[in-house]
Image (cartoon, rainbow, N blue to C red):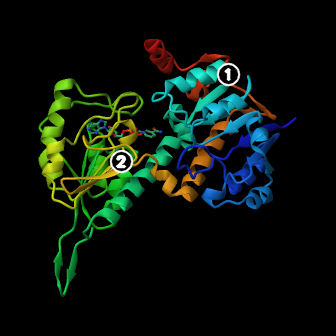
Amino acid sequence: MALTIGIPCESGAGETRVALIPSIAERMLKSVDGIKFLVEAGAGDTAFHSDADFEDAGCQIADREAVFGADLVAKVGPPSGEEIAMMREGQVVAGFLRPLDEPGLARSLAEKGVTSLAMELVPRISRAQKMDALSAMSSLGGYRATIVAADRLPKFFPLLTTAAGTIRPANVLVLGAGVAGLQAIATAKRLGAKVFGYDIRDATREEIESLGAKFVELEIDVGDQEDEGGYARELEREKQERQPELLQPHIADADVVITTALIPGRPAPLLIREEAVEAMAPGSVIVDLAAPNGGNCAYTRTGETIVEHGVTILGPTNLPADMPVHASQLYAKTITSLIEAFVDDGTFTPDFDDEIFDGACLTHDGAVHNERVRDMLSQEA
Ligand code: NAD
């Protein structure tokens, strides 16, 4: 008996990505014994992969019921209530499951008896790099944020010397220099802007400078804010309050501000206050990639684009979905690498002695496996 892996049409609003692409399916079918892909009719349409392409790669096109009846369901976004209702005890689901942002979903999956793997929880260790969907998507988001900003800015990014006069390069400030921020910096540099970067983790200074951008120094001693997982720790309250004030003059000088500052499982830190927006030149642009977690800018409205004091403020929630071809390619590679690691002779084999499985597992055997999510749920109760 082969392990069936279902690939559904994504149900999230505005989602264009798909969890598998034909070339990766073809490779995996050759290299892993005892697996079978059931792809829902039309699942790849928005990512420009037709049902015929999937069939040519060796996948079977199936209806929604069959796909959600597969042994393992591989998704991009979290399953909806209706999708969870279609699943059965003992099944496996993998995808972005928003464990720290929507812990209630973990409860529903546990109640259903589904084993779930959250791409957000894959540990950031070298062995799991090819399974790191967060980094892959952040990189796309950072690139796209700069492109969107350049599109909205009523100015050039590069320095131009023309017979009609000289154009000064745009000033781009990137707040938060993790994976998304560094990609935003690199993209803005390539477009010719003068780029500045800021973060609270020590390691980022060198990374920002190595991309040719200038590190913004604030008179605030943040110490080393990096935790064991490479993520930032939340600043103490007093420093949190000083940060926006000290950033204000740098924000006022910028034509574009791209913000990406996040602390896992916490609301996004407030870095741009109303008065900082007011101090910017009209026509300036803010792209707030922290919008889904409340935003780094006081004016940000999640999923909307607004104008305040002449400044355009964008709060996108899913920029990778603007680039479904490469987003699906990279995502498919990460999720299939995770699945492949735990398939043995046509059977999906949970291995809690493996730190990748143990880390990524959100629910198993009717219970919430992840301790942090369990704590969040017990505090809610
Ligand atoms: P993230 O999306 O959680 O946060 C984005 C950035 O916001 C981080 O750089 C963080 O330091 C910064 N930030 C948080 N609070 C801030 C504040 N108040 N002011 C300014 N900046 C603030 O992080 P991410 O991009 O997913 O990852 C962060 C880092 O983790 C990476 O840059 C890398 O060093 C590490 N990482 C390691 C691996 C690996 O080892 N496999 C993989 C991916 C990432």
Which percent across, then down, holds residue 266? Answer: 36, 28
Residue shown at 30% from the left, 54% from the top:
210
- The answer, for residue 39, to whether it is visible in the render is yes
In the figure, 186 relative to 247: above or below?
below
Q: Earlier in the sequence, mark 1 or mark 2?
A: 1
Quadrant position of the N terminus in the picture: top right
Residue type for callout 1: Lys
User: Which quadrant of the picture is home to ligand 1?
Assistant: top left
Residue type for callout 2: Gly
Q: Which residue is outermost to the right?
A: 1
Q: Which residue is outermost to the bottom?
A: 163
In the figure, 97 relative to 25: above or below?
above
Res 112 label: 1
Q: Is residue 369 left or right of residue 89?
A: left
Residue located beneath label 2 in the image: 315
Which percent across, then down, holds residue 125? Answer: 50, 34
Q: Is residue 87 left or right of residue 130?
A: right
In the figure, 195 relative to 236: above or below?
below
Question: Quarter-wise, where is residue 165 in the image?
Answer: bottom left
Q: Is residue 202 left or right of residue 144?
A: left
Q: Of helix, strand and loop, which one carries label 1?
A: helix
Residue shown at 60% from the left, 54% from the top:
329
Q: How many marks?
A: 2
Q: Is residue 317 left or right of residue 15?
A: left
Residue shown at 66% from the left, 34% from the top:
83
Which percent across, then down, holds residue 155? Answer: 24, 69
Residue shown at 27% from the left, 67% from the top:
157
Question: Quarter-wise, where is residue 348 in the image?
Answer: top right
Question: Quarter-wise, where is residue 227 in the image?
Answer: top left
Which percent across, then down, holds residue 128? Answer: 55, 37
Q: Of helix, strand and loop, which one carries label 2?
A: loop
Q: Residues within 10 Å of mark 2 (few under 14, many from 20)?
A: many
